[in-house]
Image (spheres, rainbow, N blue to C red):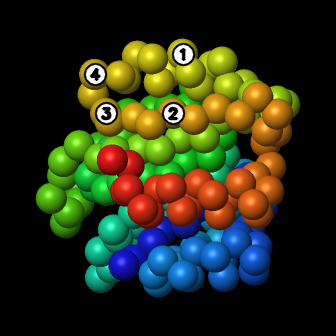
Amino acid sequence: MNILYLHGLKSKLSKEKRKILEQYGNVYAPDINYNHQHIQPVEILKHYLDTEFNVVIGSSMGGLNAYIISENIGRPALIFNPPLSNYRLTNFKSFYLKGLACKQILLGGNDDVVDPLETMTFLGKHLTTSELNINTDPMLGHRIPVSVFKKQLDTFFSKICH
């Protein structure tokens, strides 16, 4: 299994979270500079033309890009606190067979970086176009603790959204 992991703005995939992800497959976690351009799905995938990803995982700004990539390549996604109000329709040529892909999304009700209500408004408009499993945690902030990360991964990979 090939996993594309996209970190958030001003963050990186920690060694501890990488180790947990590696239990599920090969982890590809590019170092992305979001400062000049927040939405970069085409640029991200250009680095992996010979790699077929089975799932996409992203947090915050990486979650926004993971959502767009999932929509375009038809692969399941696990997304943490994505700023989907910044979503921009991005279609690109892909060597993947496109299809609807499920998305498991975790929103922190106590997130002071990405407004979960704005994200829910966006998701409400897409209930008929994607299979969405939306989870909320009223106490969760923007950062995802390792224990929450692991629990979400376990659920996601045990069901791949179903």
Say which amino acid is labelled 4.
Answer: Thr
Answer whether labels 3 and 4 touch (C-beta < 8 Å): no
28 or 24, nearer to the observer: 24
Residue count near mark 4 (Cα–Cα under 10 Å), binned few <14, some 14–19, many ≥20: few
Q: Secondary structure at mark 3?
A: loop
Answer whether labels 2 and 3 touch (C-beta < 8 Å): no
Say which amino acid is labelled 2.
Answer: Ile
Alpha carbons under labels 2 and 3: distance apart: 12 Å
Q: Position of residue 109 (x, y in %)?
A: 75, 28
Q: Nearer the viewer, mark 4 or mark 2?
A: 2
Q: Nearer the viewer, mark 1 or mark 2?
A: 2
Locate residue 90 relative to residue 84 in the image: left or right.
left
Residue 96 is tagged as none
First in sequence: mark 4 vs mark 1: 1
Return the residue at label 1.
121
Answer yes or no: is residue 17 visible: yes
Alpha carbons under labels 1 and 3: distance apart: 15 Å
Return the residue at label 3.
130
24 or 36, nearer to the observer: 24
Alpha carbons under labels 3 and 4: distance apart: 6 Å
Residue count near mark 2 (Cα–Cα under 10 Å), binned few <14, some 14–19, many ≥20: few
Locate residue 61 relative to residue 69 in the image: left or right.
right
Residue 128 is tagged as 4
Alpha carbons under labels 4 and 2: distance apart: 14 Å
Q: Residue at x 33, y 68 (%)?
A: 54
Return the residue at label 2.
134
Say which amino acid is labelled 1.
Answer: Thr
Answer whether labels 1 and 2 touch (C-beta < 8 Å): no
